[in-house]
Image: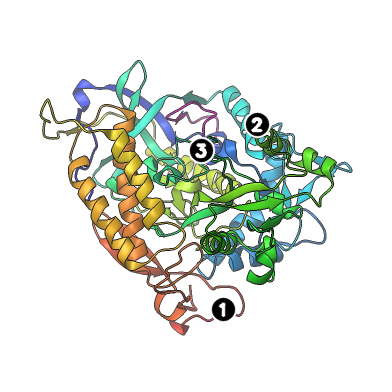
């Protein structure tokens, strides 16, 4: 794996071509922030596979974490991030992102983002794992929607930025070890080769590899899989974060119930009305997400009930409705009054912590390719992401990538030509058809059952066997549809995730092995990397963990 370098055949002499200084793949917060940071003398083309409003960023509820109050400090935010990351955070990256957060929030305000205000200042809330109130939010519980509204509006007016929606990035173009652009499928134009001096990959996560997920349908891991086929190094693929509280009502989409609900004082109760977090963790409902998700999983098993419940009945009803209008609206559609009725919730796949390895500047292991946001493994989140640190990572790394890409693009000069590239794959038999939807559904179900919140070797081996079987006859085929390419990408990502989970024989952060339930710094205080050329490579060292965490002396220097 991968079976083929490219998913589709092409010949540059027979394709349409487009040229740009900087190509940005993905129109979420990281991609558009990168596009807006590219200087106006350089052209930017942004491509996204669906409508420009469809991204994980747009669905973010809670907010953006950044130090703004005198009671708080960068040191506090850094420490909270390191503790949540369970020993695998890169300290330099954590410092870089946290220290850049306040400026990025101000830039959003300058772009027209209307954050919620109290007493003339931006309102701040607290979420699980945070020691202080430092999360800015908008429209109560629709921060992502408001932030993306403002950023999209700004990008539409930028004279050097061109936006292409309904454009599926099939693969990254590489030649002589460098990324040269991308092969895309564009509605109305067929297959197009985009040639770029530099490429910024910001295509988001892969939550759709699970049946139970908060992610929109676009989150199919396309960028991770394409980067892997192009030879890029990926890292931390065993770490998928499960959000503890996803609305669980028959007939409903799996709607996220924000971390901020617990931040404002909501209780978690089992089917018998007991607050089970009181005995599980001293931080109770405000423990980090991995702790709460596992506690819910154990409670569901103990009670043999398919969900637990969020209780807001003890909170001021007017505050609840004002603070969470979106959640209130959705729950009312199922005859639930969130000020009185318990809300049925259970965990769902939420955020991919692993992805394309990037350095502090956002460079990948492939020259000419940069990456930002959920598609990456930057080292910010470690083994578990602190709530509301995701949007700020996209903003900081989008900015950093754009600056580096612009500098490198200028070195290339004005000449940019199409290369005589071609790739052929064996023709398929006319009757060689697959039920793509059926395999996709089977894969997503398997990942929930065997690669979910709690894992163990026997079930992981079963998952590996099944995914390998599907890969053998799916990855060798040529599809002409988005659904087919998405299935190939989901299989590629799933295989990498399962392999990484099998290798890590310990429990840490979002990765919990029931057959290895303890954290083991001596044996596994490292980060796994993988690439097509090297396979599963030796793990790379991580930076210093939080104070009080034991780590082998050989790993103390970074």
Q: Is residue 87 above or below residue 442?
A: below
Residue on which the image places disc 3: 31
Pick whichever, 131 or 150, lies toward us.
Answer: 131
**Of the two numbered discs 1 and 3 in the rendering, the one whose residue sits closer to the viewer:** 1
Packing grade of label 2 (10 A; few <14, some 14-19, many >=20) is few
Side (left or right) of 91 relative to 427: right
Q: Residue at x 49, y 24 (%)?
A: 162
Q: Residue at x 66, y 57 (%)?
A: 99
Q: Is residue 272 above or below residue 550?
A: above
Q: Is residue 45 magenta?
A: yes
Side (left or right) of 496 relative to 393: left
Magenta stretch: helix, strand or loop mostly: loop
Q: Is residue 9 above or below residue 67?
A: above
Instruction: Give, as a single range, the part of the protein colored magenta.
Output: 38-55
Pick whichever, 125 or 175, lies toward us.
Answer: 125
Pick whichever, 131 or 28, lies toward us.
Answer: 131
Residue 184 in percent (x, y) is at 33, 29
From this viewpoint, is residue 357 visible?
Answer: no
Q: Is residue 459 magenta?
A: no
Mark pair 2, 3: CA separation? 34 Å
Residue on which the image places disc 2: 333
Number of the label disc, if any, that sits on residue 549 = 1
């Amino acid at each position: 794996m991968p079976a083929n370098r490219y998913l589709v055949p092409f010949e540059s002499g027979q394709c349409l071509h487009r040229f740009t200084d900087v190509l940005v793949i993905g129109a979420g917060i990281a991609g558009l922030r990168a596009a807006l940071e590219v200087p106006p003398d350089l052209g930017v083309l942004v491509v996204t596979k669906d409508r420009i409003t469809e991204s994980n960023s747009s669905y973010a509820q809670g907010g953006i974490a950044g130090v703004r109050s005198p009671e708080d400090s960068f040191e506090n935010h850094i420490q909270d991030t390191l503790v949540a990351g369970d020993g695998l955070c890169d300290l330099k990256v954590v410092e870089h992102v946290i220290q850049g957060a306040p400026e990025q929030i101000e830039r959003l305000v300058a772009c027209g983002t209307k954050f919620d205000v109290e007493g003339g200042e931006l309102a701040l809330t607290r979420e699980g794992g945070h020691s202080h109130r430092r999360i800015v939010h908008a429209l109560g519980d629709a921060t992502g929607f408001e932030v993306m509204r403002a950023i999209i509006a700004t990008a539409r007016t930028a004279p050097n930025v061109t936006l292409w929606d309904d454009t599926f990035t099939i693969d990254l173009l590489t030649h002589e070890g460098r990324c040269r652009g991308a092969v895309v499928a564009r509605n109305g134009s067929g297959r197009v080769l985009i040639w770029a001096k530099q490429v910024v990959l910001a295509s988001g996560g892969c939550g759709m590899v699970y049946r139970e997920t908060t992610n929109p349908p676009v989150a199919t891991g396309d960028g991770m899989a394409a980067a892997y086929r192009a030879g890029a190094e990926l890292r931390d693929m065993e770490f998928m974060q499960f959000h503890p509280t996803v609305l669980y009502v028959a007939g409903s989409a799996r709607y996220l119930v924000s971390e901020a609900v617990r931040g404002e004082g909501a209780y978690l109760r089992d089917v018998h009305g007991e607050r089970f977090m009181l005995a599980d963790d001293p931080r109770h409902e405000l423990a980090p997400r991995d702790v709460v998700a596992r506690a819910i999983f154990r409670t569901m098993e103990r009670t043999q009930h398919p969900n637990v419940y969020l209780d807001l009945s003890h909170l001021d009803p007017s505050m609840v409705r004002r603070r969470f209008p979106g959640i209130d609206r959705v729950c009312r559609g199922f005859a639930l009054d969130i000020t009185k009725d318990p809300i049925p919730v259970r965990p769902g796949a939420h955020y991919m912590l692993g992805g394309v390895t990037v350095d502090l500047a956002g460079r990948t292991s492939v020259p000419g390719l940069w990456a930002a946001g959920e598609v990456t493994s930057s080292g910010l989140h470690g083994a578990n992401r602190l709530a509301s640190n995701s949007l700020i990572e996209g903003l900081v790394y989008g900015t950093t990538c754009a600056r580096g890409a612009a500098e490198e693009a200028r070195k290339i000069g004005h000449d940019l030509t199409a290369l005589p590239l071609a790739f052929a794959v064996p023709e398929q038999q006319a009757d060689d058809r697959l039920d793509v939807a059926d395999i996709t559904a089977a894969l997503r179900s398997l990942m929930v059952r065997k690669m979910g919140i709690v894992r163990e070797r026997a079930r992981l081996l079963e998952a590996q066997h099944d995914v390998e079987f599907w890969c053998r006859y799916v990855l060798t085929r040529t599809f002409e549809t988005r659904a087919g390419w998405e299935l190939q990408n989901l299989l590629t990502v799933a295989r990498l995730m399962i392999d990484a989970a099998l290798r890590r024989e310990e429990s840490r952060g979002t990765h919990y092995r029931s057959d290895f339930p303890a954290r083991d710094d001596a044996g596994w205080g490292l980060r796994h990397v993988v690439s097509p050329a090297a396979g599963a490579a030796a793990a790379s060292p991580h930076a210093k963990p939080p104070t009080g965490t034991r780590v082998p002396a050989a790993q103390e220097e970074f």
